[in-house]
Amino acid sequence: MNALHPRNSQSFHQEKPVAESHEEGASSAARTPLLRALNQMIDITTTRTMAVQLHPPVIIFAMLFLVALASALLAGYGMAGGESRRWLHVIGFALVIALSVYVILDIEFPRLGLIRVDAFDQSLVELRESMK
């Protein structure tokens, strides 16, 4: 495996401080903050990893698109009987539906769209810096 692989890096950062805290002459008072911080780091990385890997099933996304299509069908059917079309309403409806679907998908995959969650990554960087 590559030395830059995240699992190797995480394993190294977890094993080295623990090994040093077990050296002769290290007090248990010195171990407590180290192990507490190490435990918090592991918890945060596990939570982040699980949040990235867990997404709703594909059927949820299919239903989202089906609801958008059904609402467009019903709106079109309702406007079909009129003598003239109100283009502002037609374009406005299409934009609202498209924007709603886009925002839902963008929130679900935060690193791919316009909505970013870089502030959450900053907390991980700060935690790592506090452990040095």
Image (cartoon, helix red, strand yellow):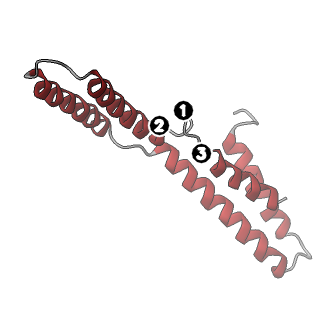
- Between 62 and 8, which is closer to the camera in this rendering? 62
Seen in the picture, residue 10 relative to 102 is either above or below; the reply is below
Quadrant of the rendering where the N terminus is positioned = top right
Which dot marks residue 112? 1
Q: Are marks 3 and 1 in contact (CB under 8 Å)?
A: no
Badge 2 vs badge 3, beta-carbon distance below 8 Å = no
Specify the quadrant of the image occupied by residue 70. Answer: top left
Q: Point out residue 112 in the picture as x, y percentages from the top left corner.
A: 54, 32
How far, Cα to Cα, is label 2 from label 1? Answer: 7 Å
Whole-percent x, y for residue 26 in the image: 88, 75
Instruction: State the CA–CA distance, disc 2 to disc 3.
Output: 11 Å
| SS of the residue under disc 2 | helix
- Tag 1: Cα neighbours inside 10 Å, few (<14), some, or many (≥20)? few
Residue at screen point 36% across, 29% down: 95
From the top left corner, tell me how far across and down residue 13 is, in percent. Answer: 77, 53
| Pointer 3 or 1: first along the chain | 1
Instruction: State the residue position of label 2.
Output: 106
- Is 99 left, or right, of 64 in this rendering? right
Residue at label 3? 117
**Residue projecting furthest to the right:** 25
Q: Quadrant of the C terminus?
A: bottom right
Kind of residue at badge 2: Asp
User: Hey, what amino acid is under mark 1?
Assistant: Leu
| Outermost residue to the left | 81
At 22% across and 31% down in the image, what residue appears? 66
| Residue drawn at point x = 27 percent, y = 33 percent | 62
Give the SS element for disc 3. loop
Residue 72 locus on image (x, y percent): 21, 28
Left or right, 126 with reference to 39: right
Q: Nearer the viewer, residue 102 or 79?
A: 79
Q: Amino acid at mark 3?
A: Val
